[in-house]
Amino acid sequence: MPPVDQPISLTRYLIEEQRAGHVSADLRLLIEVVARACKTISVAVGKGALGGVLGDAGTGNVQGEAQKKLDVIANDVLLEANAWGGHLAGLASEEMEHSQPIPDVYPRGNYLLLFDPLDGSSNIDVNVSVGTIFSVLRCPEGVTTPEDAHFLQAGCDQVAAGYCVYGPSTTLILTVGHGVHQFTLDREQGSFVLTTRSMTVPEETKEFAINMSNKRHWEAPMQQYVDDLLIGREGPRGKDFNMRWIASMVADVHRILTRGGVFIYPWDKKDPGKPGKLRLMYEANPMSLLIEQAGGAATNGRMRILDITPDQLHQRVPVFLGSKKEVEAATRYHLEHD
Ligand code: FBP
Ligand code: AFP
């Protein structure tokens, strides 16, 4: 990946993108506000036990999952930061049952923001990387008070997407539809600095990320695909594979954007009513846009994720994303089986 010669802040990068006609003034503001909220969340995550932020909040979210204190804090930080700037018409969060229009007391803009405030939250208490994922859509024309239905747009309609990883360093990964760029938080200066331009995912890989403990619950083609990876060079794939699973999608996707690989969370029959674990609007769509913008691919095992027309805000979807040839191989196993 090409190194960056001179430090360029996120603000300068966005102004240059605005001059190039790639982002509007409102979208620039929106991204800056999200980045500022991520800095606040990064500070809270970084304080750990000293900030009294670890452990369960004692509440459940719309999915019936126990919320961590930091899930609630991160959600509140993003809601508050984005309420008053005038750039948004509404917000939707993985942690809230319904979307929220921007309160009447503030002006409303033309964008919709969706986010998973703290992805990988089972890792919070064990001091392993977690992150924030976000997706930006346009508010349909003529709509001033958006409702859930107005957020149900295909992933290919996203105008921007990104995530922030709270790890050994805090990094923001962003696309506005013109490549994928990495910004590292300079903790002393308090600003995000462009550290990698135009991240690319190698086409081929020898590394996969999957929760193997679910294998007995998978579909037959999924089991066959992983059996063939495990046989290695003696089998039909003709090469040995390594496995990594952090159980924070942000961290696993970040590894793939950095050095390639394939991330899979397939359908499983543990809960046949659910078509997958991960959420289309808050996780799969933004990550798929980033991966495609970096030259990779993303499918649900059968079709491109970005082409799926959502019918529910909290809809789940199987996810196969990363190095293009490997995603195509895994997808082929499913299509040939059907
Ligand atoms: P949450 O939104 O509840 O954190 O779930 C998402 C996630 O943590 C992903 O980040 C991760 O890839 C996956 O679930 C891990 O799932 P599992 O615990 O089944 O391995
Ligand atoms: P290093 O000392 O070379 O980092 O190896 C130790 C370690 O990374 C350890 O932290 C991991 O649990 C383990 O290796 C991972 O090993 P695999 O690469 O075989 O999964």
Image (cartoon, grey):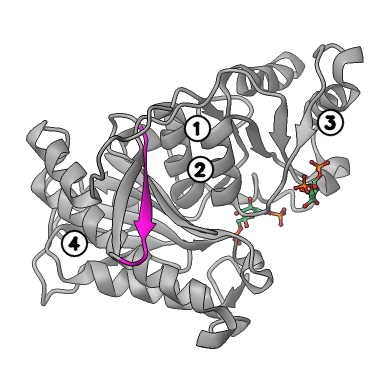
Disc 2 crowd rating (10 Å Cα; few below 14, some 14-19, many 20+) is many
**Three-letter amino acid code at the position of disc 2:** Ala
Position of residue 248 measured from the top left corner of the image (x, y, whole percent): 61, 54
Along the polypeptide, which appears first: circle 3 or circle 4? Answer: 4
Rounded to the nearest angstrom, the CA distance separating label 4 from label 1 is: 28 Å
Range of magenta residues: 180-188
| Residue at the disc numbered 3 | 223
Three-letter code, disc 4:
Thr
Q: Residues within 10 Å of mark 3 (few under 14, many from 20)?
A: some
Foreground residue among 259 and 54: 259
Provide the secondary structure element on which disc 2 rests. helix
Disc 1 designates what residue? 305
Q: Residue at x 37, y 32 (%)?
A: 3
Position of residue 41 measured from the top left corner of the image (x, y, whole percent):
41, 70
Residue at image point 57% right, 50% down? 251
Q: What amino acid type is highlighted by mark number 1? A: Ile
Q: Residue at x 64, y 44 (%)?
A: 275
Q: Nearer the viewer, mark 4 or mark 1?
A: 1
* Badge 1 element: helix
Residues tagged 3 and 1 counted as in contact (Cβ below 8 A): no
Q: Which residue is mark 4?
A: 145
Q: Amino acid at mark 3?
A: Gln
Q: Secondary structure at mark 3?
A: helix
Residue at (58%, 32%) from the top-left corner? 259
Q: CA distance from mark 3 to mark 4?
A: 46 Å
Measured in 3D between alpha carbons, the distance from the residue under mark 2 to the one under mark 3, in whole angstroms, is 22 Å
Q: Secondary structure at mark 4?
A: loop
Identify the main secondary structure in magenta: strand
| Disc assigned to residue 297 | none
Q: Give residue 106's quadrant in the image.
A: bottom left
Q: Are marks 2 and 3 in contact (CB under 8 Å)?
A: no
Let me know if residue 228 appears in the view: yes
